[in-house]
Image (spheres, rainbow, N blue to C red):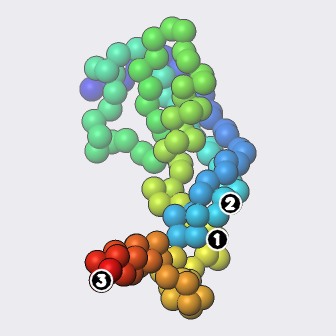
Amino acid sequence: MARTRAAWGRRIIEGFVFLTCQSSFEAFRHEVRIDDRLVLVGSEAELPPIEEESDGEDFVVADPPIEVRALVEEAVMLSLPMVPRKPGAEPDARAQREGSGKPGPFEALARLRQKNAKQ
C-alpha cells in the first residue's frame, strides 16, 4: 500500500498552564512541553492503520485552511494530566484533615443532622 504524504511539519509547544490540585485544591503551575511531528494527509483513506502509527507522529486530515489554533489547543489538552496533583502534595486530602483535627465537610454536616435530630 503506497502512502502519499502531502506535507509534514513539526509542532513545538512550550509554556505553562495553571491547574487546580485535586487533593489540596491549590493552584499550581504545570509545564507544557510538546515536540512532535504532524503528518498532513488529504483524506481518511490516507491514514495508516492504528498498528502502524507511532508516538512521534500525529496524522491530521488537512482540509485547507488548516486551523493552527485548534491543533495547538488539542495538543495542549491531551498533554494535561487526568487528575492534576501539585508536585509534593499529599496524595489524599483526608489525611491532611485527619492530621489537622478539622472535620471534613460531610462529617460536620452529619454531626449537625444528628444534633438537629435529637432536638
- Residue 45's tag is none
Mark 2–mark 1 CB contact (< 8 Å) = yes
Quadrant containing the C terminus is bottom left
**25 on left or right of 104:** right
What residue is pinned by disc 3?
118
Mark 3–mark 2 CB contact (< 8 Å) = no
Residue at the image position 28 percent from the left and 78 percent from the top: 117
- Residue 87's tag is 1
Please identify, in this view, whether the residue under mark 1 or under mark 3 is nearer the observer: 3
Q: For the residue marked with disc 2, what is the amino acid?
A: Phe
Q: For the residue marked with disc 3, what is the amino acid?
A: Lys
The quadrant where residue 76 appears? top right
Image location of residue 92, percent across then percent down: 49, 78
Earlier along the polypeptide chain: callout 1 or callout 3?
1
Callout 1: helix, strand or loop? loop
Instruction: Pick out the residue farthest to the front.
Output: 119
Whole-number angstrom distance, CA of label 2 to CA of label 1: 8 Å
Image location of residue 101, percent across then percent down: 56, 90
Q: Residues within 10 Å of mark 3 (few under 14, many from 20)?
A: few
Earlier along the polypeptide chain: callout 3 or callout 2?
2
Is residue 69 at least partly visible in the picture? Answer: yes
What residue is pinned by disc 2?
28
Q: How crowded is mark 2: few (under 14 residues within 10 Å), some or many (20 or more)?
A: some
Whole-number angstrom distance, CA of label 1 to CA of label 3: 45 Å
Q: Residues within 10 Å of mark 1 (few under 14, many from 20)?
A: few
Q: For the residue marked with disc 1, what is the amino acid?
A: Pro
Residue at the image position 51 percent from the left and 8 percent from the top: 64
Image location of residue 60, percent across then percent down: 44, 26
Residue at the image position 34 percent from the left and 27 percent from the top: 47
Is residue 5 at least partly visible in the picture? Answer: no
Please identify, in this view, whether the residue under mark 3 or under mark 2 is nearer the observer: 3
Whole-number angstrom distance, CA of label 3 to CA of label 2: 44 Å
